[in-house]
Amino acid sequence: MPTTQSPTAPEAVRRIACIGAGVIGGGWAAHFLARGYDVTAWDPAPDAEARLRRLVAAAWPALEQIGLAEGASRARLTVAPTLAEAVADADFVQESAPEKLELKRSLLAELAATVRPGVVIASSTSGYPMTDMQTEAAGSAAGAGRLVVGHPFNPPYLIPLVEVVGGERTDADAVAWAARFYDVAGKSVITMDRELPGFLANRLQEALWREALHMVANGEASVEDIDASITEGPGLRWAFMGPCLTFALAGGEGGMAHMLDHFGPSLKSPWTRLEAPELDRTLRDAMVDGCERTAGDRTYADLVAARDQGVIDVLRATGRLGDTQR
């Protein structure tokens, strides 16, 4: 497979083109500006520039609170009249057009044909695999080979996560370049080994959301109770310790192995409208091994202390700890 040779190292990127200036594209623009980049945006809507500048202005106080990079300024935002002018000098392109497959296909093909050779082009799609979006782009390193998914979470200027994955025609080095760039640009990066519709976090969110809809539709719970069940319960732990390690702690010092061996049969209980996977030895061992890698050198006591302190920190940060510590 040909190799995508970017003309600019991830650490040397200076100008970013944001194609699409809605909520996500505008959020990306605000993030990149706060990190000290020059940003050129383009959006075909007649009022796009005014909306974009309002969005960036609204985001700026929060960005100032968390800290701006040296040289960061809203004055470094330019809105170009055409797509070609927006990407002319770009070292990286972030596409954030509406979530319509045919639009994504044609726009990414146009970008691949217009952007300087080697410059990586990332899509903010929230669910489409890149394989499905790169079908109309030229089959070369300068075309489909440099198209990757860079999926953010709203608002992109505050939520750290970005999921990076290529398509069947994407060059591996384009994925590696994008992952490194996002890391340099201050994001928390997950580089996926394979495509999965919806990626990782959206699939997990969707499972929870779907079960919530079932509960409301069947009169089993109110919207208020569903939200409180997360914000006052597992959501406090998920802010700093994911569901796998959280469940591992439920197994006590025996960890994930004890939790699965003890509670595994309950996976067949009809608690949700989602079918449970078969808990065979391969899945069991993968969960145990993964939790052990995540825990690293931390003991069970270390993890419990980290979890407890994390819950306290989240409660304090959200104003729910009260005056008990005063």
Image (tube, rainbow, N blue to C red):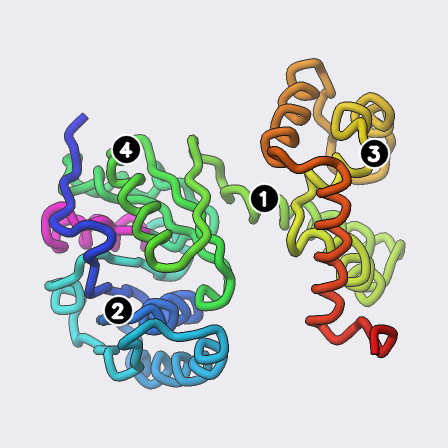
Q: Quadrant of residue 53?
A: bottom left
Residue that mark 2 sits on: 37
Real-space CA distance between mark 3 and mark 4, rounded to the nearest whole angstrom: 41 Å
Mark closest to the chain's N terminus, 1 or 4: 4
- Label 3 packing within 10 angstroms: few (<14), some (14-19), many (20+): some
Range of magenta residues: 103-122
Of 185 and 230, the residue lying toward us: 185
Q: Position of residue 167 (x, y in %)?
A: 33, 36
Circle nearer the N terminus (2, 1): 2
At numbered mark 1, what does the secondary structure look like: helix, strand or loop?
Answer: helix
Disc on res. 203: 1
Q: CA distance from mark 2 to mark 4?
A: 25 Å
**Which quarter of the figure is the C terminus placed in?**
bottom right
Q: Who is closer to the viewer here, 300 or 152?
A: 300
Q: Which mark is residue 172?
A: 4
Real-space Cα separation, disc 1 to disc 3, in angstroms: 28 Å
